[in-house]
Amino acid sequence: MDSAAGALPATESQRSSEAVAPRDLVGLSRAELTAEITGLGEPSFRADQLWHWIYHRGACDFAEMTSLSKAFRAKLAERYHVARPEIATHQLSSDGTHKWLLRLADGNEVETVFIPEEDRGTLCVSSQVGCTLTCRFCHTGTQRLVRNLTPGEILGQLMIARDALDEWPSPKDGRRLTNIVMMGMGEPLYNFDNVAQALTIVMDPAGITLGRRKITLSTAGVVPMMARCGEELGVNLAVSLHAVTDELRDRIVPLNKKYPLAELLAACRSYPGAHNARRITFEYVMLKDVNDSLAEAQELARLLKGIPAKINLIPFNPWPGSEYVCSDWDTIERFSDSLFAAGLSAPVRRPRGRDIMAACGQLKSASEKLKKSLRETQSAAHAEA
Ligand code: SAH
């Protein structure tokens, strides 16, 4: 299964279309951008200027980049563009959560969610179209992996949100978009190189300048990639745990068969940078009569002993056809209290954006529905013609 999740080779048609289409500058690393610009015979500081326009000012059009000479701008416009994914739909929940369905250049679609809170605003970013993991309670998991997102497509989600929030040039203070979580569709550690390149750009001090402490990467437990994530990116880690025995976790998070609990927890214990001030978040979805007993809360506290940990209890978000039910509210509170008594912080994550299917585990479902209704409209139009 792993190989299916690795970098997928471009098809012949993709390759030939890339040869003629202008190249997107969004997502190129600093070194790649510099190589492009010096390859045009320009000095390398021009690449820094371009970087500033793209990531500090949010410019999408070379004509706006007035500190660059007209001749250089014309040269750029012939060969490149500064693209954004197309916004297929934008929905606003009654609780203020935004959800964008974005259409990529090849027609594939991904979703991105912005969750405003009193003290922060978090963007939930997708890393893949679809997912290989088939977690039983997750709607994205019912869709096969289509492909990895490129660094530009991962960044594009942030650029779209910043456009909508009117956050260019990158504000120093008073930002609305303050945090990023790699918790959208896909498994970010199965697309590590592209995710790492995108996040490195996000953290660059001459552009978007979002620090590694404001970024959280969530994994279902791709153990061999966890250390690299800590060493190379130093971002916060979240682990989708959801069960305290291998028997149950094998069933609901099938990746556990490959990397069982003991290995996963060992990788957490040695996660670079994990200490009390920077704890690992363990996500635990509350499934009625499946994983929500008090005995399981106690076992959870025992398993996490010695790991600087906090627990995020996520009320299960239903989706059409899901086989689970969310635990009762009392049960969730008792579970949380029991962890708290054992010395662990275990807040309950308030579901956000459920009315627009933007909550955890619901992503992509709306786009499927949209496609279905589009098909129906199209076939109705066909019948009328
Ligand atoms: N593949 C990564 C990133 C996805 S994050 C990972 O598994 O961590 C999405 C989070 O939402 C994960 O913790 C996932 O387990 C959780 N989730 C999935 N389906 C859910 C649902 N229906 N209700 C609540 N949480 C869900």
Image (spheres, rainbow, N blue to C red):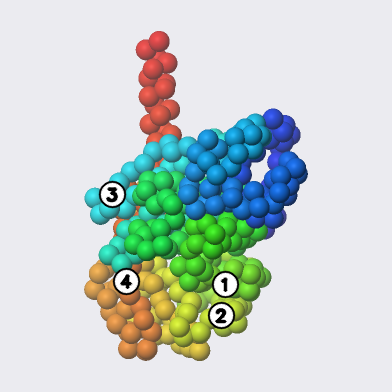
210, above or below 54, in the image: below
Q: Are marks 1 and 2 in contact (CB under 8 Å)?
A: yes
Q: Amino acid at mark 1?
A: Gly
Q: CA distance from mark 1 to mark 2?
A: 7 Å
Find out if the beta carbon at label 3 lies less than 8 Å from the nearest ligand 1 atom. no
Q: CA distance from mark 4 to mark 2?
A: 25 Å
At mark 1, the secondary structure is: loop
At mark 3, the secondary structure is: loop
**Looking at the image, is mark 1 or mark 2 earlier in the sequence?**
1
60, above or below 136, in the image: above
On residue 234, the disc is 1
Q: Are marks 3 and 1 in contact (CB under 8 Å)?
A: no
Name the residue at 56% across, 41% down: 82
Q: Nearer the viewer, mark 4 or mark 1?
A: 1
**Looking at the image, is mark 3 or mark 2 earlier in the sequence?**
3
Q: CA distance from mark 3 to mark 2?
A: 36 Å
Q: CA distance from mark 4 to mark 3?
A: 20 Å
Q: CA distance from mark 3 to mark 1?
A: 33 Å
Q: Are marks 3 and 2 in contact (CB under 8 Å)?
A: no
